[in-house]
Image (cartoon, rainbow, N blue to C red):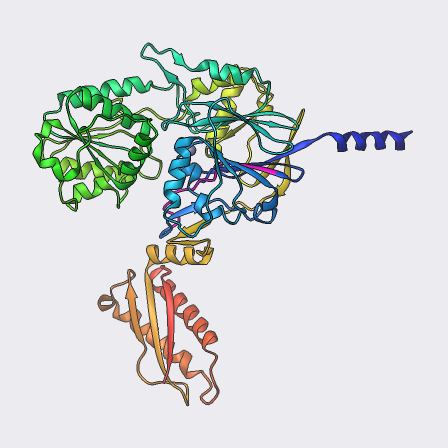
Amino acid sequence: MIKNKTAIYSKEKESEPSVRFCALGGLEEIGRNMMFVEYKNEIVIIDAGLQFPEEETPGIDFIIPNISYLEPRKANIRAIILSHAHYDHIGAIPYIIEKLGNPPIFTTSLTKEIVLKRQEDFPNLPKLNITVVKNNDKIKLSNYFEAEFFGIPHTIPDAMGILLKTPVGNFANFIDFRIEYDINDKPIGLDEIEAVAKQNIHTLFIDSTNSEVPGHSMSEKVVEKNLEEILKSAKGRVIVAMFSSLIDRFEAIIRIAEKLNKKIVISGYSMKSNIQIAQRLGIIKVKQGTIIPIEAIGHFKDDRLVILSTGAQGESNASLMKIISGENRYLRIKPGDTVIFSSSVVPGNERSVQGLKDNLARQGAIIYHSDIADVHASGHATSEDLKMVMKIIKPKFVIPIHGYYYMRSVYKKLADEIGFNKDNVILLDNGKVAEISKNKITILKEEIPSFYVMVDGLGVGDVEEVVLRDRKALSAEGMMVVILTLKKDNNRLIKSPDIISRGFIYLKENQKIIEDIRSSLKGIIARLPAYEKIDVDYLKTLVREQVSRLIFEKTRRRPMVLPVIIEV
Ligand SMILES: [Zn+2]
Ligand SMILES: [Zn+2]
């Protein structure tokens, strides 16, 4: 009997389908968002974004998701769905698409255009296979997966939510989204969310970036009203600094400028190209003559000029920095200019933004930023809005995404506050696999590689851990080069060792240490056998270790030591 029971149990277990879900990025950072679901021999990917470097990764252009699990399974990849055109969701495409076998991409028209524009920088890649989708479209992606799309407000037009129909139930993906309010603080567009709720949602995947921010989202209308006030009362030029992807707000500023009979100058390459794409698609409508080239700036009175600029995060190569430093040929800051930071400060950029503000203030600019005036509304839903969505959708399970562990854990608390069973809020890490079946989600022990893949110049993944450690050591501790010139036939020093130091100690003031190093080097060489061929690598290691130890003893510092052996 018992035997029989076991057999039935295992049979039941076998027939119980489960879908595997894994995020390769986006759960332990804001950036490199990429996740996938897998069932039998079918994989559907959502987003393929990049992450901008942090202080921990000097010299790195950016970081992309690790696809080493997907590469050998590329024949199984049925689709990549791109939720919207922000780089943290699409930026990795040029670096991974070929390795994934160039699978079909499904996305909205603006996202398609921005992806294609970027692809122009990579002329050797295969032509992308993109299908444009719009709200309410239903697409059969494969035997087991079907997708439907719905509109969600964010900071860029054509952002979409994704309803993924799977063998275990319907997954609703609210990736980057906010709730928009009208001027009377009434939420807009809840009917779309209610329509999603009617589809009986099994698991809700939801943006948790702003889970800690209290209250409801600020209306973009409030931001517009404030921008209009500032533009109207400005006695000089107004420079609005923001992200080049904030297309919704460009549209508003262009509208305000036209109303106030002001001209617009766009400063920043990526901003220009995004505005052109949006214009071509009819998303932004601009009257002839509203946008003027920067060279024409001298033909207009200051109070008729609005300059849109990139660089609100203090990026050193962006347009605002060039205007401030005097590198821009046509535009410099002068007293009476108004500068609006229409953005929030991305964590990690606080210091560079402070530097910008200091610099602007010194040059006599009047500054507005989101801490002192409502000149920016975040693109991510805040706590009350997140609760509202959860209440409308009534999912069985929730997997918070797009946020550090802390943000996702705060989301779990929000769920608890509205009486949602918090055990059904699943906190995963990058690379962890959730096995999702009809009635439960199990986190497997299995770990899919998700560690950083770094892009340095045009190389992908060729910056190893070691290189990074070296760069860190160099920037923090400096370096010392030790040059030993040896006579080939007897392995003896021809001259005293040369020592060069950079970013570590000033040699002239540290003669004692230098002498100690020299005599220790002489000691090493003296102990070498005189008439045998020396093992250069071994000698280098020996020199590096001895010199490093000596420097540490004397200075408590660990510069990088580079031995150079010259045999003549
Ligand atoms: Zn976004
Ligand atoms: Zn995002």
Q: Main secondary structure of the magenta part?
A: loop
User: Regarding ligand 2, which quadrant of the image does it lie in?
Assistant: top left
**Residue at screen point 36% across, 85% down:** 568
In the rendered image, is residue 424 in sight? yes
- Magenta span: 43-57
**Residue at screen point 89% across, 33% down:** 3
Depth check, front residue: 289 or 95: 289
**Residue at screen point 36% across, 48% down:** 121
Point out the residue furthest to the right here. 1
Q: Is residue 240 left or right of residue 93?
A: left
- Residue 477 vs 548, above or below: the answer is above
Q: Position of residue 171 (x, y in %)?
A: 57, 26
Quadrant (top left/top right/bottom left/bottom right) for the N terminus = top right
Q: Position of residue 142 (x, y in %)?
A: 61, 34
Query: Is-magenta flag for residue 205?
Result: no
Q: Is residue 408 left or right of residue 188?
A: right
- Residue 558 vs 42, above or below: the answer is below
Name which quarter of the figure residue 511 lies in: bottom left
Numbered circles on residues, count: 0
Name which quarter of the figure residue 163 lies in: top right
Depth check, front residue: 42 or 449: 42
Q: Position of residue 167 (x, y in %)?
A: 66, 28
Q: Position of residue 558 (x, y in %)?
A: 38, 60
In the rendered image, is residue 452 in sight? no
